[in-house]
Image: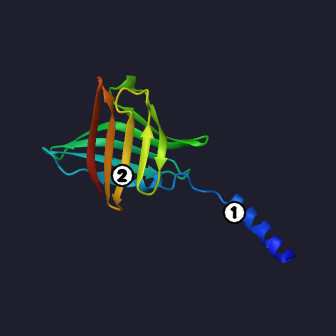
Amino acid sequence: MKNLFVLFVAFSFICSCAETDEMQFVKKLGGKWASEENENSRFFEEWEVLTNGNLRGKGFLLSDGVDTTVSEELKIEKIKNEIFYVATVKNENNNQPVKFLLVENDSQHLVFENKLHDFPQRIKYFFLSERELKVVVEGEYKGQNESNEMLLGKW
């Protein structure tokens, strides 16, 4: 019985010391994603998983196969015990970053939210497969509920 108690205490200690990776599902965004071509343009989102576990990314539009316009600089970072999606969008918000708090997080989707932002208030990523992603931006704009979605494939 004494051996069983010692094993139980040791197992409890090991389990309590094991770190869970709160960013494990967020890291699934790592890589390069692209929309289908639409009217000679294509949207891209690229995410790099950094050594500290955070992500750095960018969103850009490729028009007519040659003209690239970087529209947003992105980060997903853990600050204290919270995870934020941070977007700096060119020519919006005085080029200052906007933070969205991760409010839902599992193997199938991520939901970031900032109820005080004009639009969007929510950014959602749905993992449809290892190679397909749906991005939804939604919220209220000028008194109306708005929602835009885009399918991205990994390349």
**Which residue reaches farthest left?**
39
Which residue is at 79% across, 66% downward?
9
Residue count near mark 1 (Cα–Cα under 10 Å), binned few <14, some 14–19, many ≥20: few
Horizontal side, residue 54 vs residue 121: left or right: right
Circle 1: element type: helix
Q: Position of residue 71 (x, y in %)?
A: 31, 36
Which residue is at 28% across, 33% downward?
146
Residue type at tag 2: Phe
Q: Position of residue 78 (x, y in %)?
A: 55, 43
Q: In the displayed structure, would residue 86 be above or below residue 17?
A: above
Which residue is at 85% across, 77% downward?
1
Residue that label 1 marks: 15
**Quadrant for the C terminus in the image:** bottom left
**Which labelled disc corresponds to residue 126?**
2
Q: Quadrant of residue 118?
A: top left
Residue count near mark 2 (Cα–Cα under 10 Å), binned few <14, some 14–19, many ≥20: some
**Residue nearest the viewer, comparing 52 with 5:** 5
Horizontal side, residue 125 vs residue 61: left or right: right
Q: Position of residue 77 (x, y in %)?
A: 51, 43
Q: In the displayed structure, would residue 12 be above or below residue 72?
A: below
